[in-house]
Image (cartoon, rainbow, N blue to C red):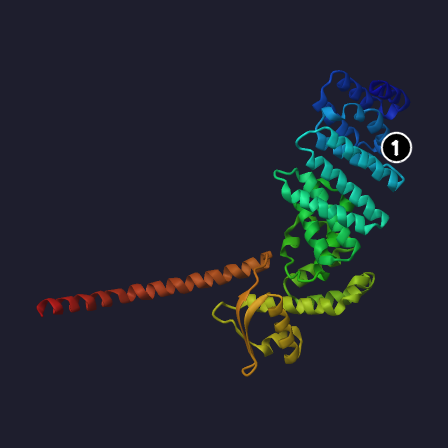
Amino acid sequence: MALQYVEAQRQARPDLADAYADLADLYQRKLWHQLTLKLDHFLQLPAAQTGDTIIQLYNNFISDFETKINLLKLAHFAVIASRQYPDKDAAISFLEGVTTKLRETRERRIDEPVLYVKMQIAAINLEKGDQKECKKLLDEGKSTLDSMTDVDPTVHASFYWISSQYHKARQEFAEFYKNALLYLAYTTVESLSESFKLDLAFDLSLAALLGDNIYNFGELLAHPIINSLIGTKVEWVYHMLQAFNTGNLALYQELCKVHNAALSAQPALVQNERKLLEKINILCLMEIIFTRPSEDRTIPLSVIAERTKLSISDVEYLLMKSLSVHLIEGIIDEVDSTVHVSWVQPRVLGIPQVKALRERLDAWVGKVHTTLLSVEAETPDLETLADSRCVKRLVQ
C-alpha cells in the first residue's frame, strides 16, 4: 500500500516526481537509513510544504516502516507533519497517536522521541492559549530531561525553545532570556532563517534590557545572532545594549532622544522607563568600580553622583540596591560620604573593557618589576649585613 501511494503521487505531482521515485526505490531496497536521509531532504522542499502533502506522506508511507527507522527521526517527521494540520486539536490528536505508537515499540530509548513530540504538543497548546497545559507538559519535560544522559541537541533545543515562548507569552523577561540563550546553545545559528534570527535577536535584546537581575550583556553581545540587528530598522536596540553594557548613561540618553519614535512603539520599554534608568545607573556604578585600581576602591559618593547625575541620597539608594542583589559587596560610610567596595560581580567583558583590563595588568606588571629591581638593589647590603653578623657570632 505504501508503494502504491508513492507511485500514485509520482504521477499526480510532476513537481515532486523525482523525489517520490527516489523514495520508492529506497523503500523497495529496504535501505532504511538512506530512506530516512531522503525523507529528511524531501520534507524541506518548498513544494512539500503546500497543503497536506506531508500529512498524507506520513499516514500513507512513513507509518508503514516507522519502527524500522531511527525513532527520534520519526518524531521529527511527525512534528513537521503536525504543522500542516489547520485544526490544532487535530494536530494534538495526531501527535498523541504518535507517542502511543512510540511507547508500543518497547525500544529502550524512547524518552527522547516522546519528549520531542510532547514539546510540540506543548507548543500547540500555547498557540491555543492554554498556558496551563503547556506549563504542565514543560514541567514533565524538565523532569524527564534531568533524568536523561547523552541527550540529542535537538531535544534540548525543542524544550528550551517552547519554554522560552511560554515565558515570552507571560512577559517573564528574565526567564525568556535564560531559556532562549539555552536554546541557542543547542542550535547552530547558520541553520536559522534570517527573519527568525532578526526576530529572536530583537526579543532577546528587549528581554535583556527589561529582565530582572540581568546586569550582564556581554554574553548576548558576544553571540553571533546579535549581528542580525546591524543594518536593520531595529539596529538602535543593538546600540542600546552597548550603552548598557558599558554603563554609558550619556549614550543611553542620546539614543532615547534620537530613537524616541521607535522606543515609543515598544510598550514594555515605555512602561519600564524608570526601571531602565535604574538599571543603567547600576551598570554605570559597576563600570566606575571596574575602571578603578584594586587598591583604590574607596569611592566618594560625589564621584558616583557626578557620573550618574543623581543626588547623594539617590546614590545611596543605588548602592543599597546593588548590594541587595549581590552585584557588589562593600560598606557605605555616611560620615565620610564614601563607599568601600570589596567585590564586584564578574561580567563577560567587551573588547574595550578587555583592553582596559590589559592596560591595568600591564601597569601592575610594571609595578611588580620595579619592586623586584628595588629588592635586587638592596640584596648586596642585606648579604653584607648578614655576613658581618655571622662573623661577629663566630668571634664571640
**Residue under label 1:** 52
Image height check: is 348 above or below 320?
above
Q: Nearer the viewer, residue 313 or 238?
A: 313
Q: Nearer the viewer, residue 219 or 139?
A: 139
The residue sitting at the bottom extreme is 335
What residue is shown at x 66% (from left), y 43% (from top)?
145
The residue sitting at the top extreme is 29
What residue is shown at x 73% (from left), y 39% (from top)?
116
Q: How many marks?
A: 1
| Drawn side of residue 171 relative to residue 350, left or right | right
Residue 127, how many percent across, how many down?
Answer: 84, 47
Can residue 187 be seen here? no
| Drawn side of residue 110 relative to residue 23, left or right | left
Residue 396, how many percent across, how many down?
Answer: 9, 70
Q: Quadrant of residue 149?
A: top right
The N terminus, quarter of image: top right
| Mark 1 surroundings within 10 Å by alpha-carbon count, few (fewer than 14), some (14 through 19), many (20 or more) | some
